[in-house]
Image (tube, rainbow, N blue to C red):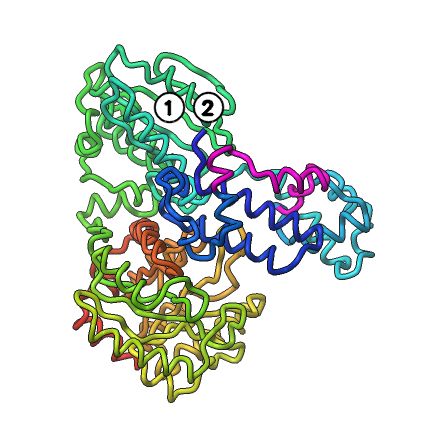
Amino acid sequence: MPVHNADITVIFEEIADLLEIEGANTFRIRAYRNAARILGDLPQEARVLVERGDDLTRLPGIGADLAGKIDEIVTTGHCSLLERLRRELPPAITELLKIPGLGPKRVKALYHDLDVQTVEQLHRAAQDGRIRSLHGFGEKTEQNILQAVQAHASQSRRFKLATAAQYAEALRAFLQAIPGVQQVIVAGSFRRMRETVGDLDILVTATPDSKVMQRFTAYDEVAEVFSAGETRASILLKCGMQVDLRVVAQQSYGAALHYFTGSKSHNIAVRRIAQQLGLKVNEYGVFRGAQRIAGDSEESVYRAVGLPYIPPELREDRGEIEAARAGRLPQLVELTDLRGDLHAHTKSSDGHGSLRDMALAAKALGLEYLAITDHSRHLTIAHGLDPLQLARQCDEIDRLNTQLDGITLLKGIEVDILEDGSLDLPDGVLARLDLVVGAVHSRFNLSRAKQTERILRAMDHPHFTLLAHPSGRLIEKREPYDVDMLRIIRHAKQRGCYLELNANPERLDLLDSHCQSAREEGVLVSIDSDAHSTFDFANLRYGIGQARRGWLEKSDVLNTRPLAALRKLIKRTM
């Protein structure tokens, strides 16, 4: 069975959780968490590196011990350390960690003090009022836990887009290699580049003698086969993701692709237009009575109902039909439109590459400039830079730029926005930089009014250029902080500064709706990788997907400009 980076990440995260519940050494726990994060962001499959015999210790943050465990997981599909830890603790205890608000420390207290080992036991303990008596909990925390358990029970599992991509792309390659298979495309929310994906819908065209269905249901990663027919099969992968495969006729391929890409509300809107024209649209084609008049391509489906082709990322019934009718559909930004990246870290703070390493990796992707924005001193966990360290880095960037060819490094900083809205570094050092990226990394629980005022005051700073990951959310881990985003967008317009769309798959922040608002207000958005290693620039594709969902065109994106034009724009904010 192929092992994906997401599988190794899950194992390392569970090891870290179990070690923390056991009370293990903090540095050991952190090593596994860092390795899980690094592998989760790694665009290359570790499996491929192992099969090639590459030295895994060359990966950032991976020492000999972790490299050995990765090799063990890839080779055997198991990890002996995890199996030992599971034997030492109750088997269902890690399920408790999926409840929002329960970290390993609280799970440890619940287990040791109340013998809570399962979600069901947690629910009963909260209902009975036994949790509030524990040190560090209280009545309010108990009620929050009760509500979180109830919400958890009603939620179906979803996968982050980048995680889903690991399974989708491996499965697509597997199906494409089957004799007789002609076309393979993953439809559904994955094709629409949603931030999270519930399941995968795959469409295939194939010759009549192809064994695609038999091969699909026998795929190595299948845990359960729900159904298997001549043209449709449904399976559950071992990771918990459901995959539906449909073999469709070439003459219906476009209609099926349109139907199974969705969204449901978009499809209903298109069918309503068709009905007004005396037509019927379904997964088999567009029909006038019994006559098929379109359906071999998606373009033909839209053309039949009087619309231009609508890109998948826009198909959410949020005005795209009206825009198409009026000829106002945006020409969506493409990955190849990006000329640079304005948010990246080096090993000077919490990154893993040198200045030169990051510059050459960005150049290899075709970028012309890269802003180095290590953390400022307030974020001690990230080894943030103080004024002297930042000044030394500026000198080093100046020297390196005289040696680099085809890529220019910009001097920057990801400076903490403090609670009062001030910036974490003095004006003297900020004045030397090409750009200043401001970010909230603390006090996420301020009221809406205070959080908004905090950010507005920071944006008013004369050296402020760009607001990083503006909502502060981590998908499925941390909700956005409460802030008046429209007010922030309008203030950015007034102030002449910019907003970031952070392409890290854990963030994808700005929200797509806020991208639309920024576009409508005339505020440029910078699509940035927030790279912490040379591998992370590959995440820019997810930022582009989010930008396209937010209706952004090339002209709406700050870092589609060539360097000379960019310098003029960012200089205005200083």
Quarter of the figure with residue 519: bottom left
Which quadrant holds the C terminus? bottom left
Asked if residue 538 is positioned above or below residue 176 in the image, the reply reads below
Question: Residue 211: percent from the left, percent from the top?
Answer: 32, 14
Q: Residue at x 48, y 71 (%)?
A: 452
Crowding near the residue tagged with mark 1, few <14, some 14–19, many ≥20 C-alpha atoms within 10 Å:
many
Helix, strand or loop at mark 1: strand
The residue labelled by disc 1 is 245
Give the numbered dot on residue 235: 2
The stretch of residues the image draws in magenta is: 71-97
On screen, residue 39 versus residue 356, left or right, reads right
On screen, residue 322 versus residue 15, left or right, reads left
Nearer to the camera, 538 or 358: 358
Nearer to the camera, 115 or 355: 355
Question: Residue 418: percent from the left, percent from the top?
Answer: 51, 77
Q: Amino acid at mark 1?
A: Leu
Q: Are marks 1 and 2 in contact (CB under 8 Å)?
A: yes
Question: Residue 24: percent from the left, percent from the top?
Answer: 68, 55
Residue extending farthest to the bottom is 428
Badge 1 or badge 2: first in the primary sequence: 2
Q: Residue at x 42, y 19 (%)?
A: 217
Q: Residue at x 51, y 25 (%)?
A: 223
Mark pair 1, 2: CA separation:
9 Å
